[in-house]
């Protein structure tokens, strides 16, 4: 049986319980009517972070929603329950919290190959130390995953937390691999594959993203309905805008006002009182810069940089693995460019293009990684020196020589001062 997350509706509570090992986790939702009369029950349960739409299998009666603010999916539904009736629903989630042990093996073999290429070089000793650290961390990843696989006595949240911890360890491993790869490239050898990262190539944030051209316009429609068949009603309107939007991004708020909440800095539109005629629905349109569907603005720059790198490494002919990696990135860009996403602005629109931008961020990170790898190596790289560092004995000898020199200079200065005073 899979791991289960249990959820009870009406009086909402969440219970985590792990059972037998499986390739999926089950969110168990329990809808209960505690009273003696029929009533309509609404259910809503957030899914864990990292879960995508394609990872979820829903039972009949529940739907999948997306929360723009938290950037997480949730399941929801509405149903009528009889007196004291209880119904259960199982939402199956693909187990995405597993490190592929084949990747662990690949990282270890890659590290060994890099260290072998540095044998006999000035970097050999430091490379061997890095290899020992990488192998220790890889063993830790495999061990923690084995201990936290969903099974008897292992709760799903324990399984998920272990995966998050392993991601942090893998990040350190890839950084160490990145230094090794740069050292090998600095000796003029091909690295076989480009698996490492470096601190100089982090995931870009909003300020790092290159946008060439103008944003498209996204139109947020806010509907307000007066259900009364006879009376007009005056109602307030207030709607938060997605976190990517600031005041300057609101091109036209229509009849609404726009401001920023001082506590959260979230931009929102509002109107204290709007009159709605009986039985009618009014729709307000807010036009914003489309900060999500930006592939047409980002891809040309990324492609240009990728092609420039491809020309650079291809002319040398010594870095086949790097060349193949760049070609893969260009193919990914072409695939993203060919995707057809939603055209109507809503929650699903934001979710789709946020994930697409995550893909573009990772491609940009890999381009930054290659650009970093092809920079000339300095003599005092963090892991490696052109000359071996001095021994402890030599270091102290240098210190004594400096101290002796300073003592002689001080004595000469004193004698000169003293002699001048006698005159």
Image (spheres, rainbow, N blue to C red):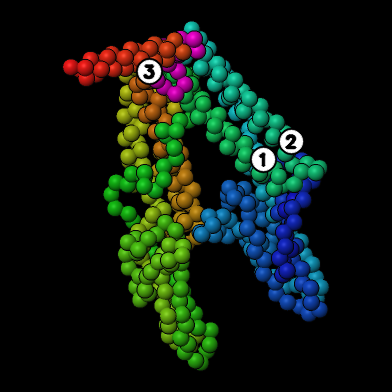
236 relative position to 88: left or right: left
Q: Is there any visible trace of residue 215 in the rendered image?
A: yes
Q: Secondary structure at mark 2?
A: helix
Q: For this view, does 95 lie left or right of residue 237?
A: right
Magenta stretch, residue numbers: 379-395
**Residue at mark 3:** 379
Q: Residue furthest top?
A: 120
Q: Quadrant of the N terminus?
A: top right
Q: Position of residue 11 (x, y in %)?
A: 73, 69
- Pick whichever, 407 or 137, lies toward us: 407
Q: Secondary structure at mark 3?
A: loop
Residue mark closest to the camera, 3 vs 1: 3
Cα distance between the residues tagged 3 and 1: 39 Å
Query: Percent x, y for residue 411?
Result: 31, 14
Q: Residue at label 2?
A: 147
Q: Is residue 382 magenta?
A: yes
The reply to whether the C-beta atoms of the residues labelled 2 and 1 are less than 8 Å apart is: yes
CA separation, marks 2 and 1?
A: 9 Å
Residue at 50% over, 29% down: 175
Q: Residues within 10 Å of mark 1 (few under 14, many from 20)?
A: many
| Rendered location of residue 181, percent (x, y) | 46, 21
Contact between marks 2 and 3 (CB within 8 A): the answer is: no
- N-terminal of the pair, mark 2 or mark 3, is 2
| Residue at the spot 70% in from the left edge and 71% down from the top edge | 41
Q: Is residue 138 above or below residue 163?
A: above
Residue identifier under label 1: 162
Residue at 47% across / 57% down in the picture? Answer: 349
Q: CA distance from mark 2 to mark 3?
A: 43 Å
């Amino acid at each position: 049986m899979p791991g289960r997350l249990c959820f009870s509706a009406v009086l909402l509570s969440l219970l985590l319980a792990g059972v037998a090992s499986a390739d999926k986790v089950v969110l168990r939702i329990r809808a209960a009517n505690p009273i003696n009369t029929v009533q309509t029950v609404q259910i809503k349960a957030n899914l864990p972070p990292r879960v995508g739409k394609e990872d979820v299998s829903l039972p009949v009666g529940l739907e999948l929603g997306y929360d723009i603010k938290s950037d997480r999916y949730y399941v929801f539904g509405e149903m009528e329950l009889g007196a004291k009736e209880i119904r259960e629903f199982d939402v199956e989630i693909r187990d995405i919290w597993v490190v592929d042990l084949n990747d662990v093996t690949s990282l270890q073999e890659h590290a060994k190959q890099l260290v072998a290429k540095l044998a006999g070089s000035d970097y050999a000793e430091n490379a061997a130390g890095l290899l020992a650290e990488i192998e220790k961390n890889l063993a830790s990843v495999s061990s923690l995953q084995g201990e936290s696989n969903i099974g008897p006595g292992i709760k799903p949240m324990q399984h998920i937390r272990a995966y998050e911890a392993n991601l942090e360890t893998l990040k350190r491993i890839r950084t160490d691999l990145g230094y090794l790869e740069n050292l090998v490239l600095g000796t003029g050898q091909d690295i076989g594959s480009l698996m490492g990262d470096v601190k100089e190539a982090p995931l870009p944030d909003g300020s790092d993203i290159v946008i060439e051209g103008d944003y498209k316009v996204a139109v947020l429609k806010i509907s307000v309905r007066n259900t009364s068949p006879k009376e007009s009603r005056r109602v307030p309107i207030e709607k938060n805008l997605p976190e990517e939007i600031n005041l300057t991004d609101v091109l036209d708020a229509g009849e609404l006002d726009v401001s920023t909440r001082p506590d959260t800095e979230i931009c929102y539109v509002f109107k204290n009182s709007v009159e709605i005629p009986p039985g009618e629905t009014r729709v307000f349109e807010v036009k914003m810069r489309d900060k999500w569907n930006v592939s047409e603005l980002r891809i040309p720059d990324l492609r240009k940089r990728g092609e420039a790198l491809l020309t650079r490494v291809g002319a040398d002919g010594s870095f086949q693995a790097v060349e193949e990696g760049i070609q893969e990135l260009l193919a990914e860009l072409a695939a993203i460019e060919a995707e057809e996403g939603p055209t109507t602005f809503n929650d699903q629109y934001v979710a789709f293009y946020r994930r697409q931008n995550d893909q573009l961020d990772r491609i940009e990170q890999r381009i930054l990684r290659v650009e970093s790898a092809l920079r000339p190596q300095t003599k005092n790289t963090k892991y490696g020196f052109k000359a071996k560092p001095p021994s402890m004995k030599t270091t102290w000898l240098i210190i004594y020589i400096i101290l002796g020199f300073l003592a002689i200079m001080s004595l000469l200065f004193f004698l000169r001062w003293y002699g001048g005073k006698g005159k």
